[in-house]
């Protein structure tokens, strides 16, 4: 009698590769959007009045202290309930980007604030306009200082992208989940998934630590 | 927007939700305490020159830091089944959280310890202090100050990560929410309440930790 479960075969490679591609896609989208939004929000928070700051701070606080999984479920049910059901990829990218933005904006804000006041004043006294001091002084110096933290946030986004599987996006962990249900070989599949994440994260995190060490001296 | 909110059912099941919140809190506290104990051992192993222990610690830290939390929970819940070890959802989530916390805290502890120059140790010894006194009065107080905030963050993070229990059917806050919403079909209401509860829990933790730090460190950073 044939077994109910079919073992893992080479035909599954394509399926797993789609998962890998999807994980990479959504992570890249979230990192790019999160970085751009975070740059804007971080800059605004570094520059603006206390009122705007508190307002932004409240929203960011919510994004940071509610678990990502709850945000994903809430958002995708919400858009469904008001009559605009979104594709899991779109819904996942939106929430993941906002979540990334919440962390990135803090990173960038500290970068902007790390450029000393005297440096800004001297740039202005040399005849630079406000925007020139931002583009030629504060952005290059501030962003260089926070590069390791930026890398750290990006890495955690790659890892957190695994959670988008709860709203039905076929990323790596979800494809492996389905393969596990079919083949009943959890260990082999999970080890493969773990190795994949490790191969992506480890070089980046070692590079981040290397840069951090170099900058500390 | 045609969605009608029905909050009654949420208030009726409030005791269950609160119970779930309690489970969330105690699984993260337990994971934090066990994580700290293991992290201290791993940090000592990493700073020692004895090779085998150092390797174990390094591998542990790197795996914990470079793979998703969800992967580790799956590994504990589904993966260990291949070895005939079947963990309950609670134990699976707890062990995954302990694994991650230990991995991250090891680096925190090591960094905190190495940030204190060894000359302080020699100086205190030369003033006639015993080793235990040096650690008790000079090194540990400074170290605690430096690792306090990273540890608070780790604790908040482990509260948020415990929400992954939803995927293995654990009955903490998010798992309870999931179960109740599938009974009542009031998805939005239940998850809004859960989100608020997580927010309140993390805020309470942060506020009490900053009060405690004021008491402990008396305003110095």
Image (tube, coloured by chain):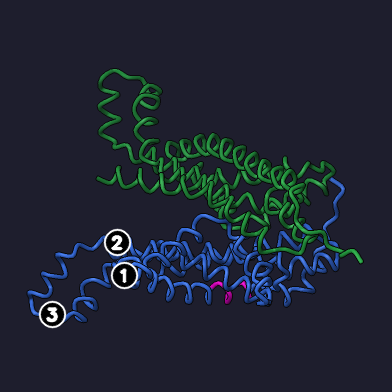
Chain colours: A green, B blue
Quarter of the image where the C terminus of chain B is located? bottom left
Secondary structure found at label 1:
loop
Q: Given this view, does label 3 or label 1 mark the residue nearer the observer?
A: 1
Would you call the spot at circle 1 few (<14 residues within 10 Å), some (14-19), or many (20 or more)?
few
Secondary structure found at label 2:
loop
Numbered tag placed on residue B50 in the rendering: 1
CA–CA distance in space, label 3 to label 2: 25 Å
Numbered tag placed on residue B221 in the rendering: 2
Q: Are marks 1 and 2 in contact (CB under 8 Å)?
A: no
Q: Are marks 3 and 2 in contact (CB under 8 Å)?
A: no
Quarter of the image where the N terminus of chain B is located? top right
Q: Is residue A15 visible?
A: yes
Which residue: 69% across, 50% down? A164
The magenta-colored residue range is B23-28
- The lab-note entry on whether marks 3 and 2 share a chain reads yes
Secondary structure found at label 3:
loop
Which residue: 69% across, 52% down? A72
Q: Which residue is mark 3?
A: B129
Which residue: 64% across, 71% down? B80
Numbered tag placed on residue A22 in the rendering: none
Instruction: Using the image as rendered, state which of residue A48 and residue B22 is in the foreground.
Output: B22
Would you call the spot at circle 2 few (<14 residues within 10 Å), some (14-19), or many (20 or more)?
few
- Classified by dominant secondary structure, the portion drawn in magenta counts as helix
- The lab-note entry on whether marks 3 and 1 share a chain reads yes
Q: How far across and how far down the image is residue B65, in percent?
A: 49, 57
Residue B212, above or below A71: below
| Mark 1 or mark 2, earlier in chain | 1
Q: How far across and how far down the image is residue B186, in percent?
A: 82, 61
In which chain is the residue bearing label 3? B
Instruction: Using the image as rendered, state which of residue B212 and residue B184 is in the foreground.
Output: B184
Residue A55, above or below B174: above
């Amino acid at each position: 009698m044939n077994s109910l479960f079919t073992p893992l075969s080479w035909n599954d490679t394509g399926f797993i590769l789609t998962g890998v591609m999807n994980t990479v896609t959504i992570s890249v989208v979230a990192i790019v959007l999160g970085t751009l939004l975070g740059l804007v929000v971080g800059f605004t928070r570094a520059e603006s009045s206390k009122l705007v700051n508190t307002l932004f701070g409240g929203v960011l606080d919510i994004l940071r202290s509610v678990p990502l999984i709850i945000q994903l479920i809430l958002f995708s049910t919400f858009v469904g309930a008001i009559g605009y059901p979104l594709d899991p990829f779109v819904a996942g990218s939106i929430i993941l980007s906002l979540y990334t933005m919440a962390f990135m904006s803090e990173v960038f804000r500290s970068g902007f604030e790390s450029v000393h006041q005297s440096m800004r004043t001297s740039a202005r006294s040399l005849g630079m306009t406000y925007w020139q001091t931002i583009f030629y002084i504060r952005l290059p110096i501030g962003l260089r200082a926070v590069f390791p933290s930026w890398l750290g946030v990006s890495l955690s986004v790659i890892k957190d992208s695994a959670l988008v599987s709860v709203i039905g996006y076929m990323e790596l962990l979800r494809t492996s989940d389905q393969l596990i249900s079919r083949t009943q070989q959890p260990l082999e599949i999970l080890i493969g998934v773990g190795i994949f994440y490790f191969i992506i994260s480890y070089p980046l995190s070692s590079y981040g630590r290397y840069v951090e060490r170099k900058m500390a001296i | 927007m045609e969605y009608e909110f029905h909050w009654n059912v949420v208030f009726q099941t409030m005791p269950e939700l609160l119970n779930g919140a309690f489970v969330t809190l105690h699984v993260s506290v337990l994971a934090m305490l066990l994580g700290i104990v293991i992290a201290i051992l791993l940090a000592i192993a990493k700073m020692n020159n004895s090779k085998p222990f150092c390797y174990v610690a390094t591998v542990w830290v790197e795996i914990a830091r470079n793979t998703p939390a969800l992967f580790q929970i799956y590994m504990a819940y589904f993966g260990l089944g291949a070895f005939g070890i079947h963990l309950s959802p609670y134990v699976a989530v707890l062990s995954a959280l302990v694994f991650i916390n230990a991995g991250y805290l090891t680096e925190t502890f090591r960094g905190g310890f190495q940030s204190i120059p060894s000359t302080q140790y020699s100086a205190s010894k030369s003033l006639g202090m015993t080793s235990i006194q040096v650690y008790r009065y000079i090194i540990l107080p400074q170290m605690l100050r430096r690792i306090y905030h990273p540890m608070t963050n780790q604790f908040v993070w482990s509260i948020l990560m415990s929400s992954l229990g939803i995927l293995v059917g654990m009955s903490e806050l998010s798992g309870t929410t999931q179960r109740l919403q599938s009974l009542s079909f009031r998805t939005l209401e239940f998850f809004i309440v859960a989100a608020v509860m997580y927010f309140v829990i993390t805020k309470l933790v942060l506020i009490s930790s900053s009060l405690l730090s004021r008491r402990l460190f008396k305003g110095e950073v």
